[in-house]
Image (cartoon, grey):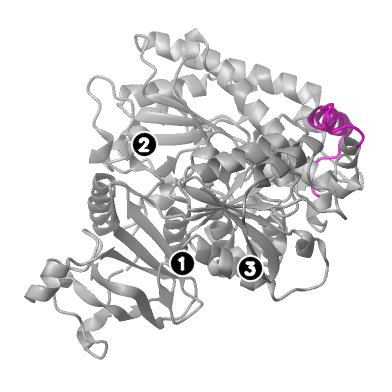
Amino acid sequence: MLVFMAMNGDFSRFNPQSYTGKVKEKDGLSQAFNVLLNYWEIKPTQYESRLQELALKDVRTVSAFVPWAHVETDIYHSLKKFVRAAWAVRLNVRLFVMPELGVNYPNAGFPKDLLANISNLAVDRLGRVIYNHAAPNIFPLPSFSSPEVLKRFGNYLIKVGSVLGEVFTETGGNADFCEIVVSNSLFNYYRSHGLSLGEHGDYSAAHVMAFRDFVDKEYRSPTNGADGEAFKMQLYEGYNRHRFFTQIERLLREKTDMVFSRKSSTCPVRHTDLYNPECDPEAAYQGLLTEMFDFKPSVQRYYESIIAGGYRGETIYLGNSGIFRRFSDQEKSFLMLAALIHSGEVGVMAEELFRLSPNFQRKLRALVAFLEERRFVRQTRVTYVSASKFSMEKRSFGLLTGMAPGVLSVVAGLDAHARQLSERLVFMDPKSVIRLVELVQLLSMAQSGKIVAIPMPMSAVPNYTADAITHFEKFKKAKHPLRLSIGVPYEVYDYHLGQVVFYDPQAFWADSELPELSRFFAALLGLAEVRAICSVSDQRIHVASYVAQDDSSQRLVFLINPTAEDLNVSLGFSDIVTLAALPGSASDTTDGAPPLVGKTFELAVPRFGVLSMQVADPAQSDLSSGRLKITSEESDAGVVTWT
């Protein structure tokens, strides 16, 4: 039996702002579920009745996408009536205001007249218009570097803010029940099918001009001199373009914040990255062929997209207008559960979510209460820093994902949030341009106790600005590093509470395959004391882990089987552990049963299924007193069947 697990990086941040008479969030479904409702598909007179139905099913927050074109032509004032109806039935409402592909609205809500003007459209490096192939229809993508697109988008946001301001006035100035969600995932879809990574992106005239201005400002420092021009050339164009995408996404978020910080429409604003697996350029093209030729969609391919979204820290959106609707109920349940485990938050249409049984609803409430009480967070130990969340160097990222599965995350640049990461190992992409600001930030992270791996300056390929090289030489002066060459030459420096690893990135610039690279990453992970959560005998099983924020010895382990066959596996730990069922997730026959103790356990993972269990370090006193007995590896009692 499949069990939903509503988990996010930190459950405490999802406690809603309450107002008089509201039911507390912990009494219903967690906000880790975005229970989506397409309000524009419902008659405004039916809003309250539909929302009351959700409230009776323990939903406390209802989410909705706000289509841009619909707001511009909303003659029935349906957005205002929808938000007001949510207030009337005492539901929180969450509004996604940024354009999102895969939404069941023509052109994903983009105004049709904007898409009719070629100067407003995004084009690839070959001058071809970039199209969206995901449901419900094929249409060209607009360029957010176009002045006309930006102006119209700003007017749309102002109108949404004005509508909300009117509702808040009618509710006595209370805006806490409404939350604005700002996402930037549209920029991810400028990656066009069939082109290499360096050629992905928007190459429209307005975008190219803005990009050149960005590069000139980035490398304008007088200390760079003539060397600064080297970083503007084709060698680093792909890297710079990915950094530019990250920059304009950040600016668009800031402008959106400004609109909703006005006094008349002030309400909570949350930033997130939203990812629809069907709208990834590669997946969308495959999805189109699946629809045209009536193929059976691949659960494995869909699941791999979810894993990638989890690495990038994205909320997964599982819509009902594309190939997701073609999966069986068991496959849908599995994909929903996998999205929750890998990303911590999932958006599901209400009609999909509530097809599940009342028994499931009961177990879900018990499980959410358990997770929120213990404050479980995703157990990540390695951070990969790249120009954007899609620009990782292929070989280095592939090796790290293989050696540190389930504990790796990707961040785009070193913003304030990234510098506060708790991960043990921080790895800087080998094809990065190291500027002074990045070098200082990375060194400060090492001071706090992390292992930070930074590419060292190269002679053949310029990868450091002049002022960064000066700081690099100053750092090395009078220090005596440990010099090693295990697959890749590198130097290890003790630095306050942590260590800095300067590695030679030249091997990553070569086209030839270098199998010895794996030894370097194995040594790097060993230095940071990062190891696999556990060992699994079958490589088809994926492992994810969460840890209690207040007690690192309390962990959750999930074994995920994305195949269509039952798998029997051996689960191994380096030390003796106890395994116990999660409250509300075990069958009635195991409720109250003592935990299993040992290093190795035999498990049966059902097809399209997930095994979930609590993992803890047993107290030595319990073992010596006999209160806990180590389970024999050959005993039938060692078979864990919790699902």
Query: Which label belongs to residue 140?
Result: none
The foreground one among 166 and 440 is 440
Question: At numbered mark 1, what does the secondary structure look like: helix, strand or loop?
Answer: loop
Left or right position of 173 against 252: left
Label located before the other in sequence (3 or 2): 2
Q: Is residue 176 above or below residue 502?
A: above
Extreme-bottom residue of the structure: 634
Circle 3 packing at 10 Å, graded few (<14), some (14-19), many (20+), is some
Residue 195: quarter of image: bottom right
For mark 1, what is the residue? 531
Q: CA distance from mark 3 to mark 2?
A: 40 Å
The kind of secondary structure element at disc 3 is: helix
x 48%, y 59%: residue? 407
Up-down relation of residue 84 to residue 398 (above or below):
above
Residue at the disc numbered 2: 14
Say whether marks 3 and 2 touch (CB < 8 Å): no
User: The C terminus lies in which quarter of the figure?
Assistant: bottom left
Determine the residue positioned at 90% across, 46% down.
Answer: 234
Residue 286 vs 494, above or below: the answer is: below
Q: Which residues are magenta?
A: 200-226
The correct choice, above or below, for 364 with respect to 257 in the image is: below
Which mark is drawn over residue 520?
3
Tell me if 30 is positioned left or right of 158 in this view.
left
Please name the amino acid that badge 2 sits on: Phe
Front tag of 1 and 2: 1
Q: Is residue 209 located in the magenta-colored stretch of the structure?
A: yes
**Residues packed near mark 1 inside 10 Å, few (<14), some (14 to 19) or many (20 plus):** some
Q: Is residue 129 visible?
A: yes
Residue shown at the point (63%, 34%) measured from the top left: 99
In the image, 153 versus 572, the foreground residue is: 572
N-terminal-most mark, 1 or 2: 2
